[in-house]
Image (tube, rainbow, N blue to C red):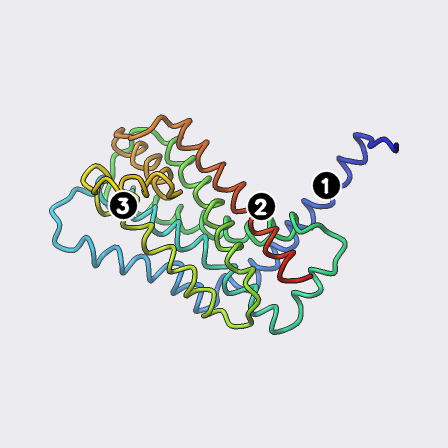
């Protein structure tokens, strides 16, 4: 039985990571400034947040965490539903599938592009709130953890939906929205989870946005439903689950 050397594993891992980064960099250069990405990932969540918070007598510290959570959800999951269908139409996606890299590297690369985009948007919102609204901060590491893990989680979610074999970005964006909109209303962003009916509270526990919002809320006001370790652990579980499902779907739809 042939043995697998540690150097061979490191070499394979290095090549996979380089390939994933090349895919992410390609998306950064081509798709970040596309109108569909800007509208779906930045303007739409911003206007929706303003529509639901208009007239509410709430302090910035109560509103900013929700704004960061929503923009993270939409921005992270907006790149792949646009980039993958367009590349299918241009037949460049077939080249990625035929390249000597694993599906793990492909899914990771597509997800990294959403992660980077989401982090950029979240930093802008965070700094703007800090400078303009002077929002007090209780725990910066919690905010960083919430933004980082939720961005990767929702980016992987967008990559998962992008596995659907279509050349029309609108088809995938419509499917993603079927998931994104309910998450907003059951995850404590607009409506406190404690005020939801028992069924709604049970559903909230299987929403990744619940744990992301909990971390960000804790970073701003110190109030949390769960221990930070629980929030981070659940987000990691969702990331791995979405990664596995995405790998399966890309393999199934492209065999």
SS at circle 3: loop
Mark 1 Cα-neighbour bin, 10 Å: few <14, some 14–19, many ≥20: few
**For residue 156, above or below residue 205:** below
Looking at the picture, how far across and down is residue 27, in whole percent?
Answer: 57, 59
Mark 1 vs 2, N-terminal side: 1
SS at circle 1: helix
Q: Image quarter for residue 163?
A: bottom right
Q: Measure how far apart labels 3 and 2 are at the Cα level.
A: 28 Å
Q: Which residue lies furthest to the right in this view?
A: 1
Q: Residue furthest front?
A: 199
Q: Name the residue under label 1.
A: 14
Q: Name the residue under label 3.
A: 189
Mark 3 vs 1, N-terminal side: 1
Mark 3 vs 2, N-terminal side: 3
Q: In this view, does 228 lie to the left or right of 89?
A: left
Mark 3 Cα-neighbour bin, 10 Å: few <14, some 14–19, many ≥20: many
Which disc number belongs to residue 66?
A: none
Q: Measure how far apart labels 3 and 1 are at the Cα level.
A: 39 Å
Q: Is residue 100 left or right of residue 21?
A: right
Quarter placement of the C terminus: bottom right
Q: Is residue 153 left or right of residue 91?
A: left
Q: Which of marks 1 and 2 is in front?
A: 2
Q: Front-most of 54 and 94?
A: 94
Looking at the picture, how far across and down is residue 15, in whole percent?
Answer: 74, 45
**Residue depicted at x 26% and y 55%:** 49
**Residue depicted at x 33% and y 37%:** 216
Looking at the picture, how far across and down is residue 46, in whole percent?
Answer: 30, 57
Q: Mark 2 points at which residue?
A: 244
């Amino acid at each position: 039985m042939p043995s697998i050397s540690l150097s061979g594993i490191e070499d394979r891992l290095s090549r996979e990571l380089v390939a994933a980064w090349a895919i992410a960099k390609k998306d950064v250069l081509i798709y970040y400034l596309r109108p569909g990405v800007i509208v779906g990932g930045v303007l739409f969540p911003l206007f929706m947040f303003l529509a639901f918070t208009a007239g509410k007598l709430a302090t910035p510290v109560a509103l900013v965490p929700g704004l960061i959570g929503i923009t993270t959800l939409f921005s992270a999951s907006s790149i792949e539903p646009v980039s993958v269908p367009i590349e299918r139409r241009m037949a460049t996606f077939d080249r990625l599938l035929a390249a000597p890299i694993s599906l793990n590297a492909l899914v990771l690369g597509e997800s990294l592009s959403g992660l980077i985009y989401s982090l950029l948007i979240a930093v802008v919102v965070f700094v703007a709130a800090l400078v303009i609204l002077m929002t007090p901060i209780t725990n910066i590491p919690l905010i960083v953890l919430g933004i980082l893990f939720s961005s990767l989680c929702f980016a992987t979610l967008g990559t998962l939906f992008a596995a659907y074999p279509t050349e029309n970005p609108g088809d995938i964006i419509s499917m993603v929205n079927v998931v994104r909109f309910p998450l907003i209303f059951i995850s404590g962003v607009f409506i406190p989870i404690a005020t939801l009916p028992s069924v709604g509270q049970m559903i909230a526990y299987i929403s990744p946005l619940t744990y992301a919002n909990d971390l960000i809320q804790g970073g701003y006001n110190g109030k949390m439903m769960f221990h930070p370790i629980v929030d981070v652990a659940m987000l990691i579980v969702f990331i791995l689950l979405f990664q596995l499902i995405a790998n399966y779907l890309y393999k199934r739809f492209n065999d």
